[in-house]
Amino acid sequence: METDDPENAPGDETWKAHTNGFDRVQSVALTVSEPRTAGWVADEALVAENTARRHLQRLTDLNVLTADFEEGATTYYPDPVYVRTREVRALVDGHDRDGLAALAADLKADVEAWREEYNVTSPDELRIQAADETVSADETRARRRVASDWEHTRYRLSLVEDALARYGEFTDRPAPA
Amino acid sequence: MSRRPGESAIAIVTDGGQGHDSSRDLGQERHRILRELRHQLDRHPAVEDVRGIPDGKFRELRANLDPAAFGRDAEDASLRVSWWPAPDDPEYAIHYSESTGLDCGFHREPNPHVDGKTHYQERDNLDENYEYETVEVSPRTPTRLLWTVLDLLAERLQ
């Protein structure tokens, strides 16, 4: 559901006091669920539309966002390569190779446990199961939560596997001459 | 409990958008949103530190807060932030707890005690039942909504 944006929400002034316009545009643009126009981002990031457009173009030039022009408007969406790369970087910075291998095993074990507990092969199947009318409201909620955890874990595991596959390349620095 | 001045009756929550694209990777979306929420918490003046939990799995955020920033005379306070994108519209929980035993938060998720998805819940200690109140919180995007909810929490706690 979506309605007009309120002009002022509680917290807006604190947000503006502790961030700049570029920070807010970036944070809004990196959390959207579908491509959005500069005007839409401007409303949520509390900046003028021209300011939002300028920052969005800069973020597109930096490959943080992708831009698409259709039906007379440019829309912006997070660049999946950027999103993946920064997470792989965080994983490599925060773990050694053994730590990443242990994390991958742990994430795989979580997925395996969900497969067995719910007797399904994917989070989509679990969402379908959760919507079954014979399932109680509490159990529906629990299964939707697990489906979300499963989707998140599947993505997180793909990041850890990327980090492991190229760990040497990502951590290698030439010795000083 | 009644609606406080800061809580808008205008709109419902978040960038759910049309949101029915089956190509959406909800796992990536949840990860990406949590990452941005973490960056925002790092900038909030009441936040002392923030990390993803469980360790390495990054399924939600836990921040240590300065209770005095919320007008509270507690030794410690923390905030838990959960975000669950879904094919229809997202759900979330932004929940404050402190060492006195009090905990409260704004949640968007079905709950048998309230009508509608978005509500505020509060209890003075673990032995009590929560009191629930239906509310509406207006921002559509996760990061702006986080700052709104932190402001609303401060209002409730002071």
Image: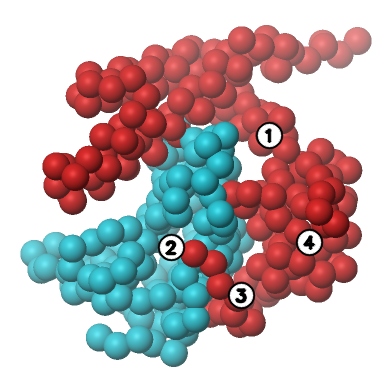
Chain colours: A red, B cyan
Question: Which amino acid type is marked by label 4?
Answer: Ala
Tell me if mark 3 has few (under 14), some (14-19) or many (20+) residues whose alpha carbon lies within 10 angstroms of its own: some
Secondary structure under the numbered disc 4 in the rendered image: helix
Residue B35: x %, y % from top left: 57, 45
Residue A124: x %, y % from top left: 38, 31
Secondary structure under the numbered disc 3 in the rendered image: loop
Residue hosting label 3: A5
Residue hosting label 4: A38
Of marks 1 and 2, the one in the foreground: 1
**Mark 2 and mark 4: span between their CA atoms?**
34 Å
* Badge 1 and badge 2 both on one subunit: no
Q: Residue at x 37, y 30 (%)?
A: A123
* Badge 3 and badge 1 both on one subunit: yes
Q: Residue at x 56, y 42 (%)?
A: B21
Of marks 3 and 2, the one in the foreground: 3
Question: Which amino acid type is marked by label 1?
Answer: Pro
Residue B42: x %, y % from top left: 58, 56
Question: In front: A10, or A124?
Answer: A124
**Mark 3 and mark 1: span between their CA atoms?**
27 Å
Name the mark on residue A80: 1
Quarter of the figure with residue A20: bottom right
**Mark 1 and mark 2: span between their CA atoms?**
32 Å
Residue hosting label 2: B65
The chain that hosts pointer 4 is: A
Q: Residue at x 53, y 37 (%)?
A: B22
Decide: marks 1, 2 in contact (CB < 8 A)?
A: no
The chain that hosts pointer 1 is: A
Classify the position of the C terminus of chain A by image quarter. top right
Q: Is residue B107 above or below residue B68?
A: above
